[in-house]
Amino acid sequence: MKKVISIAAISAALLLTGCSQVSSAASVGSVKISQATVQSSINDIMSERSKVDSSQMQLEVGEDLNRSQMRFHVLSALLNKVAEKLKITVTKAEIDIRRASITEQVGGEEGLPTALVGAGIAPKDFDLYLQSIIISDKLSQALEQSGIPADQIGTAIQRLVVDIAQENKVTINPRYGAWDAVNADVVAADSAGSAVTPSDK
C-alpha cells in the first residue's frame, strides 16, 4: 500500500526537527551529530521527492523519516569507528568507483535521483552511504578470511557495531526516538522496552 505525502506530514517532519538547529541530535562518543545535519538530510530528501514520480513508492514521512535519517547518521558514525579500530580505510577513488557502478545499475545519471528517493537517501549523503557500504564489504571480507561462515557474517558485523557503540556512548535526542543498545538501532520512543538504553541520561 503506497503512502501519500501530505502537507501535514511534511509540516510534522519540519516541526519535529526544525527547532534549535545548533543543538545536538545525537552523539557517538566524541562525534556530535547536529540537528542541522539531520534536518539538512530530511530537506534534501523532501526536495528530491518533488522532482520524481514517487506515486508507486512507499516513502517514510514524519517521525519515521526523522528516525531513519537519525539512524543513517548514527550507524555511519559507528561504522567509521569500527573501521578506525580495525584500521580499515576507504579512499575517494573507491567511493567514486562504487558510485559509478551503482549509477550504471539504476539506469545512469537520469535514473539515480529516482533510485535515491526510493532508497530514502539524500543526494548530499550518497558518498557517506557508499563509504558505509564499502566499510561493510571490507568487514565482510575480513570476517570471511578469519573463518566466519558466510551465513553468520551479517550477525558478526552487527556485533562489531553493537560493541563499538558500547565503547563509545551513544545518546539520542528524545525527539528522534531512543537508542536500542542491544540491536544498535534508533527506535520509536514509545516502543522502547527494557532492552533500550535511555537516551537522555
Image (cartoon, grey):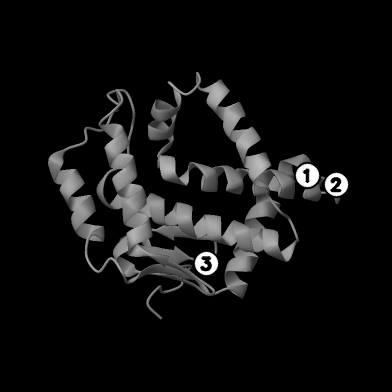
How far apart, in angstroms, are the residues tagged by discs 2 and 1? 6 Å
- Please tell me the numbered disc located at residue 155: none
Query: SS class of the residue under badge 1?
Result: helix
x then y, percent, for residue 110: 43, 21
Question: Mark 2 belongs to which amino acid?
Answer: Gln
- From the image, state whether disc 3 or disc 2 is nearer to you: 2
* Earlier residue among tags 3 and 2: 2
Circle 3 is placed at which residue position? 181
- From the image, state whether disc 1 or disc 3 is nearer to you: 1
Q: Nearer the viewer, residue 79 or 50?
A: 50
Crowd band around label 3 with a 10 angstrom C-alpha radius: few (<14), some (14–19), many (20+): some
Crowd band around label 2 with a 10 angstrom C-alpha radius: few (<14), some (14–19), many (20+): few
Q: Nearer the viewer, residue 12 or 96?
A: 96
The total of numbered circles placed on residues is: 3
Question: Mark 1 belongs to which amino acid?
Answer: Gln
Circle 1 is placed at which residue position? 141
**18 up-or-down from 133: above or below:** below
Question: Mark 3 belongs to which amino acid?
Answer: Ala
Instruction: Determine contact: label 1, label 3, CB under 8 Å.
Output: no
